[in-house]
Amino acid sequence: MSEVIVITSGKGGVGKTTTTANVGTGLAQEGKKVVLIDTDIGLRNLDVVMGLENRIVYNLVDVVEGNCRMKQALIKDKRYPNLSLLPSAQTRDKSAVSPEQMVKLIDELKEEFDYILLDCPAGIEQGFKNAIAGADRALVVTTPEVSAIRDADRIIGLLGANEVKRTELIVNRLRMDMVKRGDMMNINDVTDILAIDLIGAIPDDEQIVISTNQGEPLVGSDCLAGKAFANICHRILGEEVPFLDLEIKSSVWGKLKEIFKKN
Amino acid sequence: MPRPVILKSNKYGINLIMDRDMDFEELLACIKERFQESENFFRNAKMAISFEGRRLTQEEEFRIVDTITSNTSVNIICILDNDVLREELVRQKIEQFEEEQAGKTGEFYRGTLRSGQVLDCESSVIVLGDVNPGAKIISKGSIVVLGALKGTAYAGANGNELAFVAALEMDPIQIKIGEIIARSSDNKPAAGKRRLRKAKVTIEPQVAIVKEGNIYIEPITKGLLNNI
């Protein structure tokens, strides 16, 4: 039974594409057959984050318009053969595809893949409507900031109105040092307002910037963000995983270094 | 000589403009003729009919409708009243009824109102859930939120300044009662800063009412409720 998951947020820049790339790669690491679809027509970047931009020949719009077969457009990932990417078009815009066409496309992919992940563009217009058309489940990504939460709330309302059956929350770019100082909301503040189940909390990590630039998702690696993404994948697969303790614990040595630095 | 019977179609059906002085039986014959002439046009139509130009008794009205339905394939669903005065009276009664309703009864709404959602009610409304920032409730009566009110509430939407807004957690962006608007203060503590303060800020149920032309937000006490 394939599962179709859309990763959306409303607000731009909160980490949808990064999350799609990492969660997709993580599920592939667990042996599942995964396809990632970039539905941001005109401003594609899932291919860049996956490091596959030089392998693109055909894209989503070509498939929908019948210029090529699905197999010709799908790109196999560099590291995991059970992970594929259906890239978006860079020279068209979001009116090139309709929700009905998306549903048809997803139905075709359901026969071959266990998980279909849709990277939704920012906003609530045609791009969003296209992305949620075939989805059973949604992961709403937000950062612990008022503006992002406001937009996430709107999106959750729209997802409910469009009868997407399961919605879960990912809080991204948490900075525990700021939370401790009281300058940033903590996870409970966010879930209090948004009132949906939390499926993952990802700390702000420098490694993500590096991994994005190099085109290699960092899920499963040793850093905190990598572990957090891996935990999300396990939870999607149905396992119960306790949430990571995101505080950066300084060792005694580290504390001494701090004292000397101040002087 | 002007035609004794003129058929004019409008949004709802047909307006029958009749000659005032003609003998009723002759008029009936004319009506039958007009409708039969236009049989092709009206074939199987369902319409409402209204009468103009002549005072008719109820029996006469029924006879006309009968003539039309038995001689053509037209289906007359109802007779519309053209009496302007009566319309006005009815409208007034309805509005009065609505206003009373707004004061005495209320509707429940289950669930949280999310950003971008608008709940527009004729009567008072009780929300069993939160009202998130960006959501709006509009009511001709009062508003009670059994949860956190963090969005916009507009009570007394028909100008009624006796309406009130109550919430278990009163933290609205804007409240409007009747024509008076109040907004939340600009000096909000930064989100999250609350955690640091040792003294717990107790959240108590509060109600917003209009006093002397301004909106006051006060904790709900027995005395206050009696005075609303």
Image (cartoon, coloured by chain):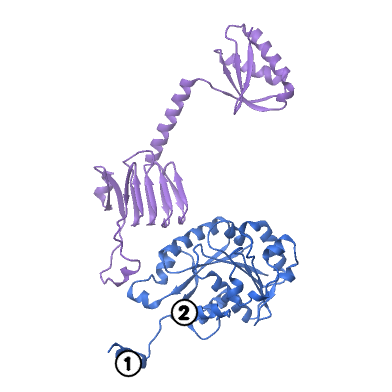
Chain colours: A blue, B purple
Element under disc 1: helix
Left or right side of A138 for B142:
left
Q: Which residue is mark 2?
A: A205
Which residue lies at the image location 37% right of the left edge and 40% below the top edge? Answer: B103
How many residues crowd around disc 1 within 10 Å: few (fewer than 14), some, or many (20 or more)? few
Give residue B202's position: percent from left, percent from top. Answer: 29, 63
Above-or-below relation of A257 to B47: below
Element under disc 2: loop
- Residue A182: image quadrant is bottom left
- Residue B206: image quadrant is bottom left
Give residue B175's position: percent from left, percent from top. Answer: 34, 49
Left or right side of B55 for B124:
left
- Viewer-nearest residue: A1 or A14: A14
The chain holding disc 1 is A
Which residue lies at the image location 34% right of the left edge and 71% below the top edge? Answer: A183
Mark 1: amino acid = Leu
The chain holding disc 2 is A
- Viewer-nearest residue: A251 or B216: A251
Which residue lies at the image location 65% right of the left edge and 58% below the top edge? Answer: A96
Give residue B191's position: percent from left, percent from top. Answer: 35, 66
Q: Which residue is mark 1?
A: A256
